[in-house]
Image (cartoon, rainbow, N blue to C red):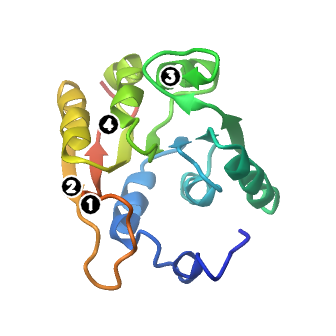
């Protein structure tokens, strides 16, 4: 990846969001395909492709991020498909659902999601996928209400959910007062 050392030194050193690294490795060892929802410049897309050894769909709505992701993906030979779109509860002109993505491409075994508050809508648009395939998910949450909404949906499908707080040592600067991740363990391909 191209690295801007002024802003991405932690990424280069392997310290970026290290709180979830072990969970990613553990869950990805059981997975063959993945979606990176809110892919930004493709950092997690590359990680997902490396650890699954399979296909990855990277979804990002922002033009500048898509351009940077294209540069980063072009430096690697992983089977990653970038899609410029928002992910939500309904498919439309600029929005696609997770159910539609899985119909158009494949059913992912793992989903990483960080879409700045749109996670409940994205899960609402994934009811068939959550019901029939039950992929593992790691979701970044930005408010208590957002976390509660995600948990409410995932509880309906029998997910085991663990909350991970940001580290207190060498903390990363976060724009939200409430921030963290929920690790959502499903059973990909088994219902």
Q: Position of residue 47 (x, y in %)?
A: 57, 60
Are there few (<14), some (14-19), or many (20+) residues within 10 Å of tag 1?
few
Q: Position of residue 154 (x, y in %)?
A: 24, 32
Residue identifier under label 1: 177
Which residue is rendered at x = 35% and y = 22% of the image?
124
> Helix or strand or loop: what does disc 3 sit on?
loop
Q: Specify which label sits upstream in the sequence, 4 or 3.
A: 3
Which residue is rendered at x = 39% and y = 72% of the image?
173
Which residue is rendered at x = 38% and y = 27% of the image?
121
Q: Specify which label sits upstream in the sequence, 4 or 1.
A: 1
Q: Is residue 62 above or below residue 123?
A: below
Left or right: residue 182 compared with residue 24: left
Q: Which mark is residue 163?
A: 2
Q: Nearer the viewer, residue 171 or 82?
A: 171
Label 2 and label 1: CA atoms lie apart by 16 Å
Contact check, label 4 and label 1, Cβ < 8 Å? no
Q: Position of residue 114 (x, y in %)?
A: 44, 47
The quarter of the image holding the C terminus is top left
Q: Position of residue 11 (x, y in %)?
A: 55, 75
Residue identifier under label 4: 187
Label 4 and label 2: CA atoms lie apart by 18 Å
Q: Is residue 84 above or below residue 49?
A: above
Q: Nearer the viewer, residue 187 or 173?
A: 173
Q: Specify which label sits upstream in the sequence, 3 or 1.
A: 3
Contact check, label 3 and label 1, Cβ < 8 Å? no
Q: Which mark is residue 97?
A: 3
> Helix or strand or loop: what does disc 2 sit on?
strand
Are there few (<14), some (14-19), or many (20+) residues within 10 Å of tag 2?
some
> Helix or strand or loop: what does disc 1 sit on?
loop
């Amino acid at each position: 990846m191209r690295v801007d050392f002024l802003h991405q030194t932690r990424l280069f050193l392997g310290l970026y969001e290290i709180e979830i690294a072990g969970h990613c490795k553990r869950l990805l060892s059981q997975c063959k395909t993945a979606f990176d929802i809110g892919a930004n410049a493709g950092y997690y897309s590359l990680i997902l492709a490396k650890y699954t050894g399979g296909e990855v769909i990277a979804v990002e709505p922002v033009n500048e991020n898509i351009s940077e992701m294209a540069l980063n993906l072009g430096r690697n030979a992983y089977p990653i498909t970038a899609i410029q779109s928002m992910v939500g509860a309904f498919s439309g002109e600029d929005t696609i659902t997770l159910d539609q993505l899985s119909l158009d491409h494949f059913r992912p075994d793992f989903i990483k999601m960080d879409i700045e508050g749109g996670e409940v809508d994205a899960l609402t648009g994934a009811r068939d996928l959550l019901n029939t395939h039950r992929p593992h998910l790691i979701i970044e949450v930005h408010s208590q209400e957002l976390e509660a909404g995600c948990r409410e949906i995932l509880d309906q499908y029998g997910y085991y959910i663990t909350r991970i707080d940001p580290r207190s040592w060498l903390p990363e600067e976060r724009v939200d007062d409430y921030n963290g991740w929920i690790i959502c363990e499903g059973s990909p391909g088994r219902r």
